Amino acid sequence: MEIFSSYNVIIGISLIIILSFIFNGVAKKTNVPAVLLLIVLGIVIQYILKAFGGDTIDFFPMLEVLGIVGLIMIVLEAALELELKSDKLIPILKSLAIALVGLIASTFIAAVIIKALVSGMTMQSAWLYATPLSILSSAIIIPSVSSLPIAKKEFHIYESTFSDILGIMLFYFLAGRLSPSEDSGVGVFFLNLILTIVISLVASYAIILIFQKIKSQVKLFLLIAVLLLLYALGKKMHLSSLIIILIFGLVIANMKLFFQGKLREYLHLEKAKSIYHELHVITAETAFVVRTLFFVIFGITIVLSSLLSLKVTLISLLILISIYGIRYGLLRLFMGKDISPQVFIAPRGLITVLLFYAIPTEAVIEGFEPGILLFVIIGSSLIMTWGMIRDKRMNPPEELEKTEPNEIEETEYFINNTTDLSEIDDTLPSSDEYETE
């Protein structure tokens, strides 16, 4: 029986996407991350393939490509939802500070643990192995926090996006330091960062101005192809390519902020808005499919026996304790006492897997067990699940619903007791304010 025939592959992918949609519904009701269910589905498929003799396929090239495309789509999806307003400057800076300090502190402690417990590990290599384990997974966080209050939801979107970008920059900086031919030094690294930001802004303006003039209905995948091309070319030039995606998303989501003065004359707002809304939909759909396939294939490649090692368990538990200890301290420092469920939402996922497989050959240490990766991913996801369920029980949504009738009564009372209609009119947004929405 040929298990990988064309029709079998089509049937398999279709069933996986349908199950992923169902998992999303289950996740909303139970707060169990859909990613965990996808990984379990991948493990089940792994054993089915073994039973039919299809376990010899090398899934890694597919995993790598899906990971890169998924990363781009997830960051773009997050950027499209971020509004840059003056009243959000403080939350953005707080999120950036927590993401940066949390990343550095978690990487340092994890590196110390790995250096002490993994034979043959140098401190430089330990930092490289620790970095993927210290990056938040926006692929898990962003879909999981949709039911949280707006302020907490935005914090997680900002924090996880910053963590992804800063973590990837740190990883490739450390990887470059291990290779003398690629080590350009700290100065050149920051120069490349500035160059990336400049290129990102120029490219973002150019893309918006050009694409608003394209009359063809088939242009969104062309736009995505351009972004993928810019990302890949940026990587070839050793630039921080993810910043290109982030800045483009921020520019198109906040066009009125970026197109001011004479630039506003070149912007056709309605057409540009149409591109934004259509891009938002197609990005979310693409991110969903790519994320689904990535985590299922990751589940297929997992070696469960690696979790049975006492050494793997010890290292993983110490890393998890350090992650949440550092996170608790940072959130109390920056956010005060209201840190639930934020303190529990620190899962590792797509970026962790992607960067682990991107570790240069010269830095690979045979003594490092991949089971540590799996243990930390599953452990952090389970902790997040428990934290979300706990928060839901302590703050049931019914309490919010009870306040709605009172708000309606207050509104009716206001209207019924207002003799001058102009008083009501003054409370409504002007037509110009509607236009800015």
Image (cartoon, rainbow, N blue to C red):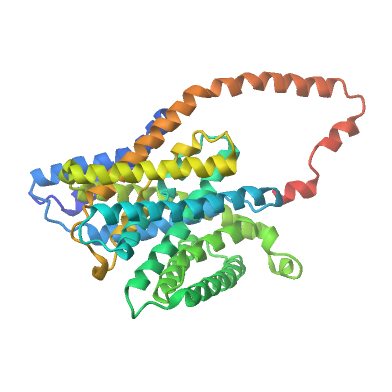
- Residue depicted at x 35% and y 60%: 127
Q: Nearer the viewer, residue 171 or 241?
A: 171
Say if residue 54 shows up in the picture: yes
* Residue 281 visible, this angle: no
- Residue 120 rendering spot, x and y as whole percentages: 21, 61
Q: Is residue 340 above or below residue 401?
A: below
On screen, residue 290 versus residue 162, left or right, reads: left
Residue 419 place in picture, x, y as percent:
92, 24
Total labels drawn: 0
In this rendering, the answer to whether 335 lies above or below 416 is below
Q: Is residue 143 above or below residue 171?
A: above
Judge from the rendering whether residue 154 lies leftward or rightward of residue 29; answer left or right: right
Residue sticking out furthest to the front: 116
The foreground one among 34 and 8 is: 34
Name the one closer to the observer, 312 or 145: 312
Q: Looking at this rendering, what residue extends furthest in the bottom direction?
A: 181
